């Protein structure tokens, strides 16, 4: 049976926690100069409808370090960009490569592609979820502070794909997520309802950050929302992560941001560049967490 990774819920809790530990181990081995060719002669197709820095580089580097190969495909490079049915592209590509990574807009299209693929499909970001980023975030927290189970995480800002993935992470890794969004920018109701008591929603950043072990945020206008930038800047006044807000979290609270960041908007420079910020470790861990994910999806019964 082909195992896909479209959301964090696609991998069972215990296995997901083991995957994070494997990512930490792979990182340590790489830092020692050890790079086993675990995916030698394997090929990953990378379909990008949305541009990326960290996602492309981390997946390409992961495959190279594992002895495999990655193929970058933009809409200009494929028949998908010319209107070929998603089902047909999935059937063809999955007969030629060993795994497919997709970064796109509509989550429904990703699900349709996976349903017709005979090889594992990875969600490298959709408008609904960004699960690969959460693997890196959880790895980073564990490296700095130990187990995240039982901790409190604050999400400040838009109820977007990152927020949805943090909601799923709260379910899978057993922490409490305190969300603060402006009115009208709440996360998807179905995603929240499925999470039950592990999340708390408000419109007050101070309430969400209170006694948090980790504070996370994202840009106010994501890719595809550029025309909303001015309106969102007005709506998100008061939702900036700054020194005043961070003082309400625990003294040793960490700060995370999936990047790219807009200093002076969703976060101030003194926070993202300050001692509580672990955003550079977080960005690097995209590489190591995805290596663990690739290894697992190639052999999920290992």
Image: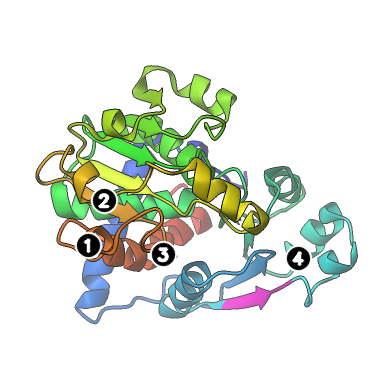
Residue receiving disc 3: 291
Q: Residue at x 44, y 60 (%)?
A: 295
**Which numbered tag is attached to residue 270?**
1
- The residue closer to the viewer here, 290 or 302, is 290
Residue receiving disc 2: 242
Q: Residue at x 21, y 68 (%)?
A: 28
**Which numbered tag is attached to residue 93?**
4
Magenta-span inclusion, residue 77: no
Q: What stretch is highlighted in magenta?
A: 70-74
| Marks 1 and 2, the one that precedes in the sequence | 2
One can see residue 20 in this view: no
User: Residues under labels 3 and 4: Cα distance?
Assistant: 21 Å
**Which numbered tag is attached to residue 157?**
none
Could you tell me residue 34's position as x and y percent?
26, 78
**Considering the numbered disc 3 on the image, is that residue within a helix, a strand or a loop?**
helix
Instruction: Locate residue 225: give its quadrant.
Output: bottom right
């Amino acid at each position: 049976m082909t195992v896909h990774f479209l959301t964090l819920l696609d991998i069972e809790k215990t296995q997901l926690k083991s995957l994070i530990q494997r990512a930490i181990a792979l990182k340590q081995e790489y830092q020692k100069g050890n790079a086993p060719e675990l995916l030698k002669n394997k090929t990953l197709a990378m379909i990008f409808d949305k541009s990326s820095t960290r996602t492309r580089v981390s997946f390409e580097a992961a495959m190279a370090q594992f002895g495999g190969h990655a193929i970058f495909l933009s809409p200009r490079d494929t028949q998908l960009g010319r209107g070929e049915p998603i089902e047909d592209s999935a059937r063809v590509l999955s007969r030629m490569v060993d795994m497919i990574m997709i970064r796109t807009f509509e989550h429904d299209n990703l699900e349709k592609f996976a349903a017709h693929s005979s090889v594992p499909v990875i969600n490298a970001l959709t408008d609904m979820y960004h699960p690969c980023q959460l693997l890196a975030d959880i790895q980073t927290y564990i490296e700095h502070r130990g187990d995240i189970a039982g901790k409190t995480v604050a999400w400040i800002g838009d109820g977007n794909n990152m927020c949805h993935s943090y909601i799923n992470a709260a379910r899978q890794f057993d922490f409490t997520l305190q969300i603060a969004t402006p009115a009208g920018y709440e996360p998807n109701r179905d995603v929240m309802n499925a999470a039950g008591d592990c999340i708390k929603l408000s419109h007050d950043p101070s309430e969400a950050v209170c006694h948090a072990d980790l504070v996370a945020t994202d840009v106010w206008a994501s890719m595809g929302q550029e025309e909303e930038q001015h309106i969102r800047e007005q709506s998100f006044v008061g939702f900036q992560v700054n020194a005043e807000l961070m003082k309400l979290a625990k003294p040793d609270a960490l700060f995370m941001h999936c990047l790219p960041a807009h200093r002076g908007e969703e976060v101030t420079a003194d926070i993202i560049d300050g001692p509580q910020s672990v955003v550079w470790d977080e960005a690097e861990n995209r590489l190591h967490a995805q290596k663990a994910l690739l290894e697992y999806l190639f052999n999920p019964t290992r």
